[in-house]
Amino acid sequence: MADLERAAAAVLPPDVRDFVAGGSGDELTLAANRAAFDRTFLVPRVLRDVSRCATDATLLGRPAALPLAVAPVAYHRLVNEDGELATARAAKAAGVPFAVSTLSSVPVEEITAVGGAVWFQLYWLRDGARTLELARRAEDAGCEALMLTVDVPWMGRRLRDIRNRFTLPAEVRAANIDAGGTAHVRPSGASAVAAHTSEAFSPALTWATVDRLREHTRLPLVLKGVLAREDALRAAESGVDALVVSNHGGRQLDGAVPSLDALAELAPALGGRCELLLDGGVRSGTDILRALALGAAGVLVGRPVIWGLATAGEAGVRRVFELLTAELRSSLGLAGCADVTEARSLRTVR
């Protein structure tokens, strides 16, 4: 995966590379997400039949070829002209769900038409009625789940984007919510994308909003961006179907707890009352195994998908899934696990 990251960095414009790779503030949480994996060690089992290691899993009640979904990442057309369509085709071929961002550069209807499993990531807009219309639009398009992001009252201070005065090119837009706007106007000493999201997103998202959305949709409801034990317990009590334990890839509060550390606390506290997914820092099949051992049903993978897309379009994204499949199968066998279910019984030393 590091090879793909270097290859993508070589072909992307510097400001786009920074937009994808960067975090907020001093990027402490961005680095800590990886460090949390590096200090988590597995205790393998032996003398088990691992002649066949199965990587298939169940996510949100549906089968998947891997315990993995594509994380919602904005504006895939920044790195490849086919954008989310190429990602959707690769995800379908790999048998994994694709969580499409509200800020997708391709309309959700075109993505679901590809035919794979699609979840829709929802930002709560300042116009609540418009947000509910977007949720219904995603449902009507055939999305299988709604993933409400709850950690972005506004975009964190991403210093790389501020220094670059990052602006979307004219041909890239948030296809699901507008045709242009401030994201295309180069600001003075700021990020145009941050200005756009501050205008569009509501900072007044509350538990009452979650209840409102729950009543509005028949789809499974996932909350993305939960780190605190208290919030996780309340979400479980409110009937949320799953949580994504996430610090937004180190792009929101710099200094927030690494996602993997939060997972290690939340999984035993919840006791299986709702499904847990892990987002942030996943770079290998062994990372997936670590997350499973700490209580995750699966993981979300974001930046590596964009690196693959940047280097070789759909084929590059397929390569990401091929690597993760091969690595996970190898790690499962070496840990003495014949399948994903057995992986969840592994002990860890941290």
Image (tube, helix red, strand yellow):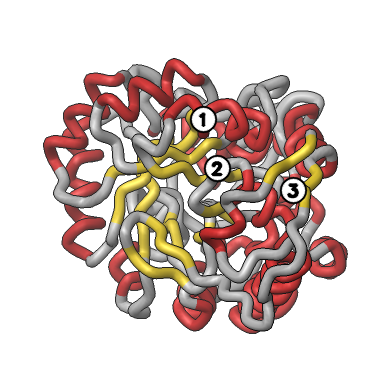
| Up-down relation of residue 123 to residue 157 (above or below) | below
Specify the quadrant of the image occupied by residue 217. Answer: top left
Describe residue 155's horizontal placement relative to residue 143 as left or right: right
In percent of the image, x 72 and y 70: which residue is there? 333
Q: Which mark is residue 21?
A: 3
Q: Amino acid at mark 2?
A: Gly
Mark 2 Cα-neighbour bin, 10 Å: few <14, some 14–19, many ≥20: many
Q: Residue 108, image x and y in percent? A: 33, 63
As rendered, which of 248 and 57 lies closer to the eye?
57
Q: Looking at the image, is mark 1 or mark 2 earlier in the sequence?
A: 1
Question: Is the residue under label 2 in contact with that under label 3 (CB below 8 Å)?
Answer: no
Q: Residue 318: x, y in percent? A: 62, 79
Task: First in sequence, mark 3 or 1: give its number.
Answer: 3
Q: Residue 218: x and y, percent?
A: 15, 49
Q: Which residue is mark 2?
A: 295
Q: Secondary structure at mark 2?
A: loop
Going by the image, does 96 lie left or right of 241? right
